[in-house]
Structure formats: structure tokens, C-alpha cells
Image: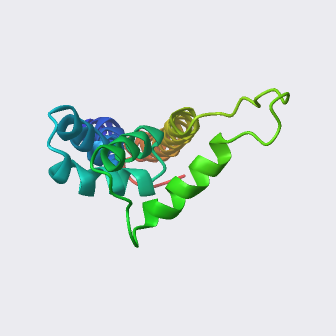
């Protein structure tokens, strides 16, 4: 019983963490195709990653569309491109740029928060399981001390 619990204690975080790399899969696939100059194949991956908010994907798409002298028509990233271009143009030349947290650092923060919450949940489950086993052990001990059930 304890072996099963320990195995599940190890497998649960491993299974949950396998979904995290899938988030960046479109980005890595798209950037790999972009670097290989296979732009037509890279565009769908980069658009999905750009819709998820990856700045590198947006920059790569921007360069692809500039090289091909195309403008993305009707895509969700077209509006994002226009908004990013407008945001890059400073209204006042004397204004100091405001540092912003990048999307990657925000995602990294939330991944850490998720990992901490998972760790606390696992510790909580372990403590509950331990308490239940301790009570059962005590009941078993009481029954073995008094084989005839008399008190």
C-alpha cells in the first residue's frame, strides 16, 4: 500500500509537468522552420505561438511578412502586429522607456507558482494518507492486544 502511494506521489507531478513543454512546442517548431528558411511551413506554427503571446513568434512573423512583402490579412496576429507597431512608436522622444516584464518571465513565474502549489498539494495528500495509516495501525494494534474483543 505504501509502495503504491510513493509511486503515485512520484508519478503525479511527472504527468502534470509533461503538459508544460507542449505550450512552447508551436514556438520551437515554428522558429526551427523559420531558421531553416521554410517560411510557408513556419507561418501556421508561429501564428499559433503569436496568438499565445510569444514575442519571438511575433517578431519572426513580422520579418517573414516584411521579406515576402505581405501583410497578414484577416488573421488574429494582424491586429497584434498593428498594435505592436503602434506601441513601438514613441509619442514623445524625450520620454524614457518603461521596462515591462516579458511574456516568458510572466509564464516562468506562473509555472513556479503552479509547481509550488502542486508540491504543497502532494505534501498535504501524503500527510492525510499517513494519518489514516497511523489510525489503522493503532486500531490493528488494539485488536491484536485484545484477541477476544473484550475491553
On the image, the x and y values in percent for residue 75 come to 40, 68
Residue placed most toward the observer, 124 or 113: 113
Q: In which quarter of the image is residue 56?
A: top left
Residue placed most toward the observer, 7 or 111: 111
Residue placed most toward the observer, 124 or 129: 124
Q: Is residue 148 visible?
A: yes
In the image, taking residue 108 as reference, residue 15 lies left or right, namely: left
Q: Which residue is drawn at 36% across and 41% down?
A: 63
In the image, taking residue 96 as reference, residue 112 lies left or right, namely: left
Q: Which residue is drawn at 44% across and 47% down?
A: 136
Q: Residue at x 40, y 73 (%)?
A: 74
For the image shown, how many numbered marks are present on the structure? 0
Residue placed most toward the observer, 67 or 140: 67
Colour setting: rainbow
In the image, taking residue 66 as reference, residue 86 lies left or right, namely: right
In the image, taking residue 52 as reference, residue 127 lies left or right, namely: right
Q: Residue at x 58, y 48 (%)?
A: 85
Quadrant the N terminus occupies: top left
On the image, the x and y values in percent for residue 130 come to 47, 39
Q: Is residue 18 visible?
A: no
Residue at the front extreme of this rendering: 69
On the image, the x and y values in percent for residue 126 come to 47, 39
On the image, the x and y values in percent for residue 119 come to 50, 36
Amino acid at each position: 500500500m505504501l509502495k503504491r502511494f510513493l509511486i503515485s506521489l512520484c508519478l503525479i507531478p511527472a504527468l502534470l509537468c509533461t503538459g508544460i513543454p507542449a505550450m512552447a512546442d508551436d514556438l520551437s517548431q515554428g522558429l526551427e522552420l523559420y531558421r531553416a528558411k521554410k517560411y510557408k511551413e513556419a507561418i501556421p506554427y508561429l501564428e499559433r505561438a503569436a496568438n499565445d503571446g510569444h514575442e519571438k513568434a511575433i517578431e519572426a512573423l513580422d520579418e517573414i511578412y516584411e521579406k515576402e512583402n505581405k501583410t497578414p490579412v484577416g488573421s488574429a496576429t494582424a491586429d497584434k502586429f498593428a498594435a505592436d507597431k503602434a506601441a513601438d512608436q514613441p509619442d514623445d522622444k524625450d520620454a524614457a522607456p518603461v521596462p515591462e516584464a516579458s511574456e516568458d518571465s510572466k509564464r516562468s513565474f506562473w509555472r513556479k507558482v503552479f509547481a509550488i502549489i502542486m508540491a504543497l498539494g502532494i505534501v498535504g495528500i501524503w500527510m492525510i494518507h499517513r494519518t489514516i495509516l497511523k489510525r489503522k495501525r493503532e486500531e490493528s494494534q488494539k485488536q491484536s492486544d485484545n484477541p477476544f474483543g473484550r475491553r
